Amino acid sequence: GAVVSQHPSWVICKSGTSVKIECRSLDFQATTMFWYRQFPKQSLMLMATSNEGSKATYEQGVEKDKFLINHASLTLSTLTVTSAHPEDSSFYICSADQRVGSGELFFGEGSRLTVL
Amino acid sequence: AQTVTQSQPEMSVQEAETVTLSCTYDTSESDYYLFWYKQPPSRQMILVIRQEAYKQQNATENRFSVNFQKAAKSFSLKISDSQLGDAAMYFCAYRSARNTPLVFGKGTRLSVIA
């Protein structure tokens, strides 16, 4: 149980286009989902927290208009990178929190974004 | 704000030997969770072990165990009988309460030498 699926796992896009990444909790309802970004050989940095049915809370320094996060249901959160540029190339990982659980967060497989 | 510090960017261990990865954290909370995650080259985050702060007993999971020192705010991971498959990046992480995010350390890259 407690499976989180993230899609796509790998995407290449042209500069100026938008890319949507989906994060789904397959067998549980996720009250909260967190989006992280990871540059090569670095740690995971929190980008934003999304709660179902409400606006996401962004970390300082994260552009809200560039990284659009939507959490429309208890099983789906999406991250849209708008007008992507090469500096947005990174590894994006989502994690989900169960309603009733052990404090553990469950991670998606991650999405590698390359902007040409 | 809570912080997590991993002071060993890289470690290596001989196969079948034991290695300990260090982690310290800073918090004013009394109730929280601590985790060790493994990230192999696939970059999938794999939970290795977790510890609730209110539990005095150190958590163990097969070859993995922790030394949790609450007063010292220390949470080290011991890997016994190291295997080649243990080679990966290891992240120590802190979580204060439900609905809060994980705070990660910078990671320790573990190499296992055959």
Image (cartoon, rainbow, N blue to C red):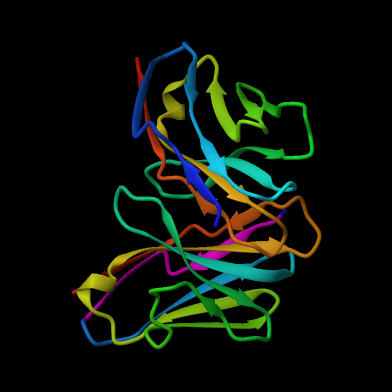
Give the x, y percent position of residue A31: 71, 71
In this view of the protein, can residue B39 be seen by the observer? yes
Foreground pick, A31 / B114: A31
Q: Which residues are magenta?
A: A2-14
Residue sitting at 36 percent across and 25 percent down? B11
For the residue pair B10 and A4, the one nearer the viewer reads as B10
Identify which residue is drawn at 56% across, 45% down. Answer: B26
Q: Quadrant of the C terminus of chain B?
A: top left
Q: Residue B85: within the magenta?
A: no
Q: Is residue A11 magenta?
A: yes
Which quadrant would residue B36 be assigned to in this image?
Answer: top right
Q: Residue at x 70, y 48 (%)?
A: B32
Which of these two is toward me, A10 or A89? A89
- A10 lies above or below A76: above
Vertical arrangement, residue B23 with respect to residue B11, above or below: below
Q: Position of residue B87 (x, y in %)?
A: 40, 30
Please say whether residue A27 is visible from this viewpoint.
no
Q: Is residue A54 left or right of residue A79?
A: right
For the point 40% across and 35% down, the residue is: B108
Does B29 sit left or right of B25 as displayed? right
- Picture coordinates of residue A20 (x, y %)? 43, 80
Q: Is residue B29 left or right of residue A46?
A: right
Query: Which quarter shows the N terminus of chain B?
Result: bottom right
Residue lying furthest left in this view? Answer: A116
Residue A49 image offset from top left, x and y in percent: 57, 72
The image quadrant of residue A14 is bottom left
- Magenta stretch: dominant secondary structure: strand
Which picture quadrant has residue A21? bottom left
